[in-house]
Image (cartoon, helix red, strand yellow):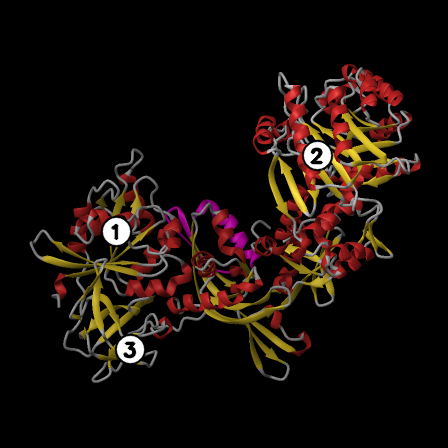
């Protein structure tokens, strides 16, 4: 084990493109974790999606050995944390495993919105924050101005910020020295009963479920019989180690250390983020604080474009679930979309990620239905039901009240965008609970119904603030609402995949906008097509797609048959990607685009 | 033995028209002797595979077959007569440019055996002819038509309409002038911007905008109405004739009869086989010299494939198709040819109607035929 005084646990906070991954790579390289030839760009972001989007989805750690100025060798554990509100809970657990953070700010761009929420979260965990001003070799770099900004906007001392260029390899040693000198060593008692926090877990095809842990007290070693306190399961530890970033097996992990364990666990679902691991015999009596049961908050249907892919989808979802316990799924049948799954996610980004992984890693074409939240219904007979899918909405006469989840949203924004953001929140039935200014920025607090947020709130917020506003939320429970089910009828047939639950006050606007959009997305047919939005039998919006007027090949003689037949084949191929409702073929793009409302 | 039609492609033009995507080539010199030899060899190859058939029509298409020496035309017709029995009523058509030079050959072409001429008039005013890149002017075109009408029993001409900015008024006036010319047949094509043509480039560059589909649909309806009233109803999407004056050769295509196609780029359908000849003139000549025919591709057609071809050709006709007869011909159930639910749905919508076992596309359905085919013809038949 390592002397507590020689351990430093830290994370890196940065806006996208400010150089987090490049800096992490440099630190690994500098301390000899990987040879030059082994460095693929951005070692820590493993998934293609992570690399492309510049986001981190799964927490990762790497252990670095660094000889400080005092001649002692330190164990540095660098924690790469997810950076999105959908994963706020995972982030909070990762941060809880550290004592400090590097705040990386681009020397030319200054502090940006995305950084704010994360840095505040880090401050909340009592972290020591070490500002690193990156890209100082850029001609446009203004490190002094950026220091002022950090002090003014974030309110931390930036006078001794480290100046660096991860790309050019400038200031790397200074960053490492600052970690050693300024970030506090962890505490912990080797002789106390074992308490280790389960930071994250993932499925490895060779090792089974790998669990990332931070040992608080006690020692964790191979052969130990442990208990997951919240999960209630017991396991025999068969492997203990750390990532450098390659796997290295160790004999034990002591207090203050971060590393991994394996215990022949088959499903990630058994290893819940935030759980406390202790020994079966003589274990801790009390769990670590902060554990939460992760509950999916956004639901949608996922259907294969080609009905024949259903089994493949089932198989792929099952495999993904092995590695991501935070989404749920159950089978669903739609009149138009056929067999698919109703899936629950932590948020919209999580939904997008799962959808993208299914289509990319498992080569599936999917149709996604409108995202929905979980409603709690009280029936007239006094019973309750949870509604995950608008299609399951019971007859309104049997419903006494409907409740919907609300959230508390915190938005940071440069004040020039404040007006539009307040309007957006107001339009989404928001209730303002606070407005404070921090430097040139405003912090706005709103209570909002979650169903208004899952719709396209985040996209709209980004677009009206040009990406400068940051958004964070937590759930604050259920509230009663005047909610109705809105059906969309195409050629007088209800399209189940497009039905949604909306607040009565929003129904007309939403219905009109959806009808208008479908009018543009559904191609003209051989007959005219009414598109209607309706609540029960009452039509609240209507559009008509005019009939096609002309589609005919003018010249077709002996030599043209082959060409004409190819055209027919192409038309038929195109129809395969459509769903038919009341003789109307709706392209799958229409489902996706209609549900992504964008401008209203 | 089913009758046979013969198509002969002459690939040369004096200039390439900006709307045309047919297999045409501009060459400074043509070795007529070499072409005669090649076309005769290619024809002999087809004849050997199709013995004992009666030839009901010959069609010289192009390109510009009116640029062929009449003597060459004569020798090709003679050769066809040696290979096959020529029907008494055989129709022998030649496509001609309406220029004075070519009109001078009309007497000789009639002498060679041509009994029907199809003139590429395309428009009746100089401005439009210039837009369409034609080498003749309106007066020259009308003069050529006059010569043609004196030498050939049957004359037809082409017009291109639904041009950029074309209005119902200007097109109606143009149609009246065309009808006054007194031919028994007219091909009236809506301008189509084909990929790879100069027009396609111009449209892409924004130099002009094609007429939109709604306006084109109005002109299509106007055309059918006016032509019917004048006694030359449409018997196919773009072809109008006084009853009995229909192109027998083209009807063979649309009724999915057998036809042999020779010459560069010519397609054929015979003996349940699709044939394609080399497109480029030089490659064609070399192929015939080396292999004794100009074929670049010969592919057996499956029953389903033939059925789908028969439908997409046959439904272009005013007479429609006899679904039961096609089903017998290809050994498939009628429901495999036409989706019964879609057929009923579009019959209710007034786009098709049924007459005994015939399925007929209505006036309202004709301008929508491509989309309608994609609905009616089941996917299994096409795949």
- Whether residue B326 sits left or right of residue A126 in the image: it is right
Residue sitting nearer the eye, B62 or A96: B62
Are the residues at dot 1 and dot 3 in contact (C-beta closer than 8 Å)?
A: no
Q: CA distance from mark 1 to mark 2?
A: 59 Å
Asked if marks 2 and 3 fall on the same chain, the answer is no
Mark 3 neighbour class, 10 Å CA radius: few under 14, some 14 to 19, many 20 or more: some
- Range of magenta residues: A414-442
> Is residue A437 rendered magenta in the image?
yes
Q: Position of residue A546 (x, y in %)?
A: 75, 48
Q: Residue furthest left?
A: A71
Where residue B25 sits, quadrant-wise, is: top right
Q: Quadrant of the C terminus of chain B?
A: bottom right
Name the residue tied to disc 3.
Answer: A287
Query: Of label 1 and label 3, which has the lower sequence position?
Result: 1
Kind of element beneath mark 1:
helix
Kind of element beneath mark 3:
loop
The reply to whether residue A311 is visible in this rendering is: yes
Q: CA distance from mark 1 to mark 3?
A: 32 Å
Q: CA distance from mark 2 to mark 3?
A: 76 Å
Name the residue tied to disc 1.
Answer: A24
Q: Position of residue B64 (x, y in %)?
A: 71, 24
Mark 2 neighbour class, 10 Å CA radius: few under 14, some 14 to 19, many 20 or more: some
Q: Label 1 marks which chain's residue?
A: A
- Whether residue A98 sits left or right of residue B259 in the image: it is left
Residue at 47% in and 50% down: A462
Q: Position of residue A53 (x, y in %)?
A: 40, 51
Residue sitting nearer the eye, A106 or B146: B146
């Amino acid at each position: 084990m390592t002397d507590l005084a020689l351990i430093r646990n830290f994370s890196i906070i940065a806006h996208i493109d400010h150089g987090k991954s490049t800096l992490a790579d440099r630190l690994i390289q500098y301390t000899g974790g990987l040879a030059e030839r082994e460095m693929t760009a951005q070692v820590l972001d493993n998934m293609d999606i992570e690399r492309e989007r510049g986001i981190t989805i799964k927490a990762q750690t790497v252990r670095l050995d660094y000889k400080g100025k005092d001649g002692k060798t330190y164990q540095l554990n660098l924690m790469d944390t997810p950076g999105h509100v959908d994963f706020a809970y995972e982030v909070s657990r990762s941060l809880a495993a550290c004592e400090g953070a590097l705040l990386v700010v681009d020397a030319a761009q200054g502090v940006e919105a995305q950084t704010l929420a994360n840095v505040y979260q880090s401050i909340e965990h009592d972290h020591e924050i070490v500002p690193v001003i990156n890209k100082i070799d850029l001609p446009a770099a203004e490190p002094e101005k950026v220091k002022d900004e950090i002090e003014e906007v974030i309110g931390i001392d930036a006078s001794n910020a480290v100046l660096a260029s991860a790309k050019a390899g400038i200031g790397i040693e200074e960053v490492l020295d600052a970690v050693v000198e300024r970030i506090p060593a962890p505490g912990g008692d080797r002789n106390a009963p074992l308490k280790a926090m389960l930071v994250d877990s993932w499925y490895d095809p060779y090792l089974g479920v790998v669990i990332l842990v931070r040992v608080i007290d006690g020692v964790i070693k191979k052969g130990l019989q442990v208990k997951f306190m919240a999960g209630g399961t017991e396991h025999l530890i068969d492997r203990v180690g750390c990532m450098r970033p390659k796997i290295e097996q160790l004999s034990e992990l002591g207090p203050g250390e971060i590393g991994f364990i394996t215990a022949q666990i088959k499903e990630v679902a058994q290893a819940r983020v935030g759980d406390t691991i202790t020994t079966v015999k003589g274990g801790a009596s009390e769990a670590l604080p902060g554990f939460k049961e992760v509950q999916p908050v956004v639901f949608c249907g996922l259907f294969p474009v080609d009905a024949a892919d259903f089994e493949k989808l089932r198989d792929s979802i099952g495999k993904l679930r092995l590695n991501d316990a935070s989404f749920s799924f159950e089978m669903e049948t739609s009149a138009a979309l056929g067999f698919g799954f109703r899936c629950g996610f932590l948020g919209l980004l999580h939904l997008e990620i799962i959808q993208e992984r299914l289509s990319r890693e498992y080569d599936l074409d999917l149709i996604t239905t409108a995202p929905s939240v979980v409603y709690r219904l009280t029936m007239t007979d006094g019973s309750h039901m949870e509604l995950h899918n608008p299609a399951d909405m019971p007859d309104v006469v049997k419903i006494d009240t409907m409740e919907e989840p609300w959230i508390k949203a915190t938005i940071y924004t440069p004040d020039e965008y404040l007006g539009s953001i307040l309007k957006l929140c107001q339009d989404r039935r928001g209730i303002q609970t606070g407005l404070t200014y921090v430097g040139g920025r405003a912090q706005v607090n709103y209570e909002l119904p979650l169903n208004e947020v899952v719709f396209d709130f985040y996209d709209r917020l980004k677009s009206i603030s040009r990406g400068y506003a940051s958004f964070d939320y937590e759930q604050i429970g259920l509230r009663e609402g005047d909610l109705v089910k809105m059906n969309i009828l195409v050629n007088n047939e209800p399209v189940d995949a497009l039905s949604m639950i909306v607040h009565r006050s929003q129904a007309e606007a939403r219905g009109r906008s959806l009808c208008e959009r479908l009018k543009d997305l559904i191609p003209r047919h051989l007959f005219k097509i009414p598109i209607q939005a309706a609540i029960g039998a009452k039509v609240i919006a209507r559009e008509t797609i005019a009939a096609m007027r002309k589609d005919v090949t003018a010249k077709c003689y002996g030599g043209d048959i082959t060409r004409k037949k190819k055209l027919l084949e192409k038309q038929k191929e195109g129809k395969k990607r459509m769903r038919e409702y009341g003789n109307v073929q709706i392209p799958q793009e229409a489902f996706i685009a209609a549900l992504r409302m964008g401008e209203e | 033995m089913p009758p046979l039609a013969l198509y002969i492609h002459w690939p040369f033009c004096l200039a390439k028209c900006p709307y045309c995507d047919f297999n045409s080539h501009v060459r400074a010199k043509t070795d007529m002797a070499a072409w005669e030899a090649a076309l005769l060899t290619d024809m002999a190859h087809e004849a050997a595979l199709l013995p004992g058939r009666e030839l009901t029509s010959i069609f010289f298409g192009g390109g510009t077959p009116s640029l062929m020496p009449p003597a060459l035309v004569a020798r090709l017709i003679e050769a066809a007569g040696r290979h096959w029995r020529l029907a008494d009523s055989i129709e022998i058509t030649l496509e001609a440019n309406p220029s004075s030079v070519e009109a001078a050959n009309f007497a000789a072409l009639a002498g060679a055996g041509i009994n029907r001429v199809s003139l590429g008039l395309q428009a009746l005013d100089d401005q439009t002819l210039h837009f369409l890149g034609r080498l003749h002017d309106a007066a020259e075109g009308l003069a050529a038509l006059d010569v043609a009408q004196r030498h050939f029993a049957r004359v037809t001409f082409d017009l291109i309409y639904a041009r950029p900015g074309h209005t119902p008024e200007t097109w109606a006036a143009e149609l009246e002038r065309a009808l006054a010319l007194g031919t028994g047949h007219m091909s009236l094509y809506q301008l189509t911007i084909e990929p790879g043509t100069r027009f396609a480039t111009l449209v892409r560059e924004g130099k002009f905008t094609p007429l939109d589909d709604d306006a084109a649909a109005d002109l299509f309806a106007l055309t059918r109405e006016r032509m019917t009233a004048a006694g030359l109803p449409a018997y196919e999407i773009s072809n109008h004739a006084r009853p009995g004056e229909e192109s027998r050769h083209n009807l063979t295509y649309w009724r999915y009869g057998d036809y042999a196609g020779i010459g560069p780029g010519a397609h054929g359908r015979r003996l349940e086989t699709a044939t394609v000849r080399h497109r480029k003139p030089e490659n064609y000549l070399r192929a015939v010299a080396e292999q004794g025919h100009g074929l670049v591709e010969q592919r057996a057609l499956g029953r389903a494939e033939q059925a789908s071809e028969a439908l997409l050709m046959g439904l272009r006709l005013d007479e429609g198709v006899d679904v039961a007869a096609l089903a017998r011909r290809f050994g498939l159930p009628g429901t495999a040819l036409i989706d019964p639910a879609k057929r009923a749905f579009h019959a209710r919508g007034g786009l098709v109607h049924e007459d005994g076992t015939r399925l007929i596309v209505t006036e309202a359905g004709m301008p929508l035929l491509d989309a309608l085919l994609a609905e009616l013809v089941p996917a299994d038949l096409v795949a």
